Image (cartoon, rainbow, N blue to C red):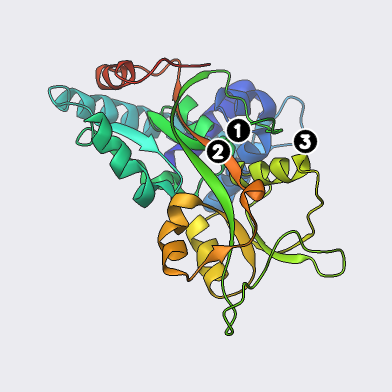
Amino acid sequence: MEIRWLEDFIALARTRHFSRAADDQHVTQPTFSRRIKLLEEEMGVTLINRQTLPLSLTPAGEEFLTLCEQVTERVRLTRDRVREINAGQKRRIMVAAPQSLLPHFLPEWLMSTGWHDRVQPYLRATGWVANDYFLALARAECDLAICYWPVGRCDLDIDTSACTYRVIGHERLIPVTGLTTTGEPCALLPGTRNQPVPWLAYPKRGLLGSAVKAHLARLPQGTYLTAQSENLYAAGIKELVLLGYGMSWLPERNVAAELAQGTLVRAGDSRWDVPMELRLYRHQNQHHAELDGFWSELASPRT
């Protein structure tokens, strides 16, 4: 059971409305409803009477609400006390980033800023997709978020209006494939209708998957792909490509060594490359001395 589930329940008891409570908690209604259901399953009882308008609490829910308020208040007081104890120490900046950037970009970039000893990767973020980063910034779960961002038009269902960003680098997603036992590429673009290229894809709602889709739509030449699997992690996709299961678009930094060694080769020329920005986002309402100092040393922000 998570503390935020208790906070969700308090919000629902206050608003008596799933949609309004979800807005208060800065999550989508399906996510909020799922967390309330998980809470009921964890407790083993029904807490919400969903047959009334507005919603009401069951007798068990009324009793549980009192406990939730006591627990969350105790957590708040403890959190405040811990912060007071730590007030004399410099606060570390927590930055969320995709797993693929942790070994191949983040360390070098932090060294270049001179803040490497004051910025810490937020490791819970390695399994997040697109919108998760911005929800976490809104909740102050992390201070900063680094995201791959498509260059050029790309339809994304992501609200970034409460955030500002700075471009801190660039990357290309390049099409790569492994080699057969005879040394030939396993898969080559563009494929044909009768023989589509086996493709190891990213989730459709993720930034990398959306960027690849948008780039292919802009090409005058048709592309014939058949998705073999979906994987959030570039490292996992790279392993499957190396094993000969097809091709994929991978960050150039992540495959530079394999291309140099010849264990991976290009599955298409540069027209298939997908340009990406590396954007550093922060929420406009999130401030503390360390974060503001770090941000002021970077280039001018954009909204």
Q: Residue at x 42, y 63 (%)?
A: 260
* Residue that numbered label 3 is attached to: 51
Q: CA distance from mark 2 to mark 3?
A: 48 Å
SS for dot 1? loop
Task: List the single residue furthest toward the bottom.
Answer: 181
Q: Amino acid at mark 1?
A: Val
- Disc 2 or disc 3, which is closer to the eye? 2
Q: Amino acid at mark 3?
A: Gln
* Residue that numbered label 2 is attached to: 276
Give residue 89's position: percent from left, percent from top.
14, 26
Q: Is residue 47 visible?
A: no
Q: Are marks 1 and 2 in contact (CB under 8 Å)?
A: yes
* Residue that numbered label 1 is attached to: 151
Say which label, 1 or 3, has the lower sequence index: 3
Q: CA distance from mark 1 to mark 2?
A: 5 Å
Asked if residue 36 is positioned above or below residue 239 in the image, the reply reads above
Say which label, 1 or 2, has the lower sequence index: 1
Q: Which quadrant of the view contains residue 96?
A: top left
Q: Is residue 212 left or right of residue 261?
A: right
Tell which of 79 and 266 is nearer to you: 266
SS for dot 3? loop
Q: Which quadrant of the view contains residue 195?
A: bottom right
Q: Is residue 86 left or right of residue 226?
A: left
Q: Residue at x 55, y 75 (%)?
A: 243
Give residue 215's position: percent from left, percent from top.
70, 42
Task: List the single residue furthest toward the right.
Answer: 194
- Disc 1 or disc 3, which is closer to the eye? 1
Neighbours of disc 1 within 10 Å: few (<14), some (14-19), many (20+): some
Q: Residue at x 54, y 33 (%)?
A: 8
Asked if residue 191 is positioned above or below residue 131 in the image, the reply reads below
